[in-house]
Image (tube, rainbow, N blue to C red):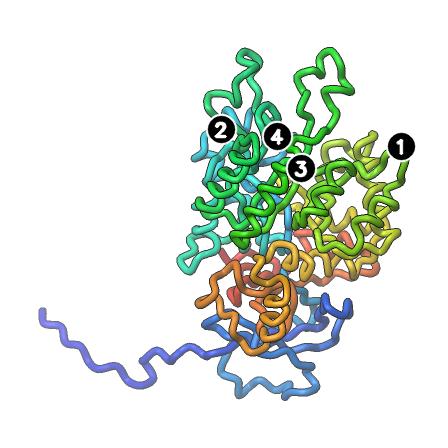
Amino acid sequence: MQLTASAPTLEDQAQPAAPTKIVLAGKLFDPYTLQLLDNQAITICNDSGMILDVSPLSAISSNFASFDGEVIDLRHLTVLPGFVDTHVHFFLHPYAETSWVDQVTKESIVERTIKATVHAKRTLMAGFTSVRDLGTEGAGDADIALRKCLSSPGALIPGPRYFCVTRAIAPTGTYGPKSSLYVNKEGIDDVTGVDVADGTQECVKAVRRQIGAGADWIKIYADYAVRSRASEVSRRVGAASMATFDYDELKAMICTAHAYGVKVAAHATNRSTIIPLISLGVDSIEHAYDMFTPDSTAVEMFEEYAGHKTKYVPTLAAYYTMTQEKGEIWDRAANSFKAALELDLDNISCGGDTGVFAHGANALELSLMVRLGADWRKVLRWATLGGWECIRSRMWEGEAGKTRLAQVGDLKEDPRIVGDNEVPFGAVRKGFIADLIATPGNFAADFEGAVSAESIQFVMKGGKIYKRDGLPLV
């Protein structure tokens, strides 16, 4: 049988895609002004995913019948910039399911990586469009490959914009997993939770090694329960968090990372550890729950913190989950955070140490902050613009960064040119990437309900819709 083909008519030919789409927001949260703006229209470039314009609906025609692009009507919802979790561990899952030691020593890297992809999707569906993963915890450099799958032009799986550190750095004998048979060996079956380094020379090499592997950030364990093996005979000694690196080692790592244009996060709980870190210009302090000393209050400690650019990431959700809101550690974490509020400290970002508790429940950190007395508007700022200010690269800092930020409205930060992790996010303004979420909730009346994963009805990352009408599209 002979087949003949006829030329398609004009009606049959595919029409070129419209260059833009418009999102209509009933209310729009602006983290710069802390205001909820009524009835805004957000114009987005389909090719770049960048925001081209944000205008009141009253300033433009409300009749979009002649507009040939997509109109996404969210006038029944409050639209926000996508949330940012500045402290996650995609390669971990809740310790209530499996202990940290068993995850690190009994789950293969393949299994842990597959779970990480599931965690990434849950996180995105909960409205968190960007995260900083502060260590694979024994999964080596697997986060570099995961980043390629999440945050590159050829992204294979749905998930947030992904900043990572590969392996955190700690000195000999500090971190787990620790063998009960070979107590002088690092790790179990050649699995170590960190990159081990001692002395300034090794510390410099470790930083260079992580940066060479592709790390966005360097993470240092600046204090830890080093003498944990003494717990059987001396519980207080075994549980005590103490400094791991000396000042010269810390200085070597921070200076080396900064010389390469890479920021540094420090796991630090004690005031005596935190003060020198701040003086050395560390970029973020994780936890900081023990701000009290016999001679000073937490408020006095944060007075020393104030005025520095170092971000405070309190990880309240991890301590809340592990202690069930009971005990000395939770009390100290909560009181330290309250002290920061008393001083109106604003260089805070929201990172829950997610992975200790369930991925997708990231908003617990925001809820706890409000429960402890924080203004919900500030919490939304810390979880959006404050998150970007924390995890963005050093190329956005200093005088050069100010100049760059002032030119964002010129649409120069196209992700196809600068890359997915260099775009500005965390605000809905011209020149920022279109990371948007929406909720029907009322923040003032029921903040926890408004930010919960179940309430997030719409998720857009980089101009692409991943969740609509409460349902995942991927």
Q: Amino acid at mark 4?
A: Glu
Q: Secondary structure at mark 1?
A: loop
Tell me where residue 261 sits by quadrant. bottom right
| Of 20 and 402, the residue lying toward us | 402
In three-dimensional space, the C-alpha distance between marks 4 and 3, rounded to whole angstroms, equals 38 Å
Residue under numbered circle 1: 294
Residue position marked by numbered label 3 in the rendering: 247
Q: List x then y, in percent, for residue 275.
A: 76, 42
Q: Label 4 vs label 1: CA separation?
A: 38 Å
Q: Nearer the viewer, mark 4 or mark 2?
A: 2
Q: How far is mark 1 from mark 3, CA to CA?
A: 23 Å
What's under tag 2, amino acid-wise? Glu
Mark closer to the chain start, 4 or 1: 4
Closer mark to the observer between disc 2 and disc 3: 3
Q: Nearer the viewer, mark 1 or mark 3?
A: 3
Q: Nearer the viewer, residue 288 or 76?
A: 288
Q: Which residue is mark 2?
A: 107
Q: Residue at x 70, y 51 (%)?
A: 310
Determine the image quadrant of residue 243.
top right
Circle 1 crowding by C-alpha within 10 Å: few under 14, some 14–19, many from 20: few
